[in-house]
Amino acid sequence: MDIGVLTVPLGGQSQEEAFSYLSDIGVGAVELGCGGAPGDDHLPREEYLGNEAAQSELLDLLEEYDLRISALATHNNPIHPDEDHAGEADTELREAIELADELDVGVVTTFSGLPGGSPSAQVPNWITAPWPTEHANAHDYQWEEVAIPYWREIAEHADDHGVNVGIEMHPNMLVYEPHGIARLREATNERIGANFDPSHLYWQGIDVTEAIRYLGERDAIHHVHAKDTKVYEAQAREKGVLDTTPYTDEPNRSWLFRSIGYGHGESHWKDVVSTLRMVGYDDVLSIEHEDSLTSANEGLEKAVDVLDRAVFETTPGEAYWAE
């Protein structure tokens, strides 16, 4: 199992500067943004798509620093009710899949997107309750008339290119918990699965290791983010966890994204790693730094320090004691 990094926090550095730094701190893989919210600082999609010379230079540079690409990232909303927004996000996603194929990268990470609540809607609508009944009807519309038809097309496109699509379960998106991943996968094909990011599950009260088992039983974990969250109970007891307080108003939030080990201890992360191995995932833990209480470099280095003691570097040996 490799420790990886989503390189977005190092966007001010060149490819070589970022790769050199990550290699020095013990990272073995990189997840490269190529559109949408992650941006494209280290992989401008239009410069690399179909450009064998540029791709060769990138792969040579990665080899020089003993790194590999775990995934390409493009997080946007391809089922947004605004057609221009949706069209741009759709292009980003389809081209990311094509570029992943050309680079021999097996996964593209993304969001499910979120439609409006009706054909006439102008903004996305995150529906979290079935009542009043109009909300249940709108939720059915989002799934049956928008999301499933769209994602069937993307699943076929991904299959044509031999690439898996890892959807991050993210609030304010249609798929924000494991049952949503399972539903979308069942309605499409096996190319659709999870970019398993536990940070959004913690504050929803979802047991992360149980979620790993649930998706692992369905062979639905395509990629994993290593990102922690701390729930601050004093605030949560007053206003719950559906918190619209700005992320930078840290003292008044119910929860914050934290560096690995600052939301849950090392023993928890060892349990996460072990459970992932139990369900057959033995690939990359890609650190996503979004801790506003420390710098990117310090957050990444502390995360690597914890994960370095948690990940397994060898394959399981013979269980001689079981014979």
Image (cartoon, grey):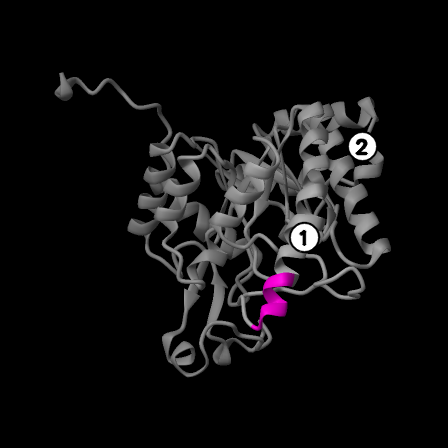
Q: Residue 235's spot in the image, x, y percent? A: 42, 80
Q: Which mark is residue 113?
A: 1
Task: Inspect the image, locate mark 2, and give the three-letter code of the amino acid beneath it.
Answer: Tyr
Answer whether residue 60 is visible to the viewer in this image. Answer: no
Answer whether residue 37 is visible to the viewer in this image. Answer: yes
Which contiguous range is marked in magenta? 132-137
Left or right, 24 with reference to 54 = left
- Residue at the far right: name it: 84
Q: Nearer the viewer, mark 2 or mark 1?
A: 1
Rendered view: 269 above or below 19: below
> What secondary structure is the magenta-colored segment mainly?
helix
**Quadrant occupied by the C terminus:** top left
Asked whether 133 falls inside the magenta stretch, the response is: yes
Left or right, 309 with reference to 241 = left
Q: Residue 104's spot in the image, x, y percent? A: 66, 23
At mark 1, the secondary structure is loop
Q: Which residue position holds label 2?
A: 48
Mark before the other along the chain sequence, 2 or 1? 2
Residue at left 67%, top 33%? 155
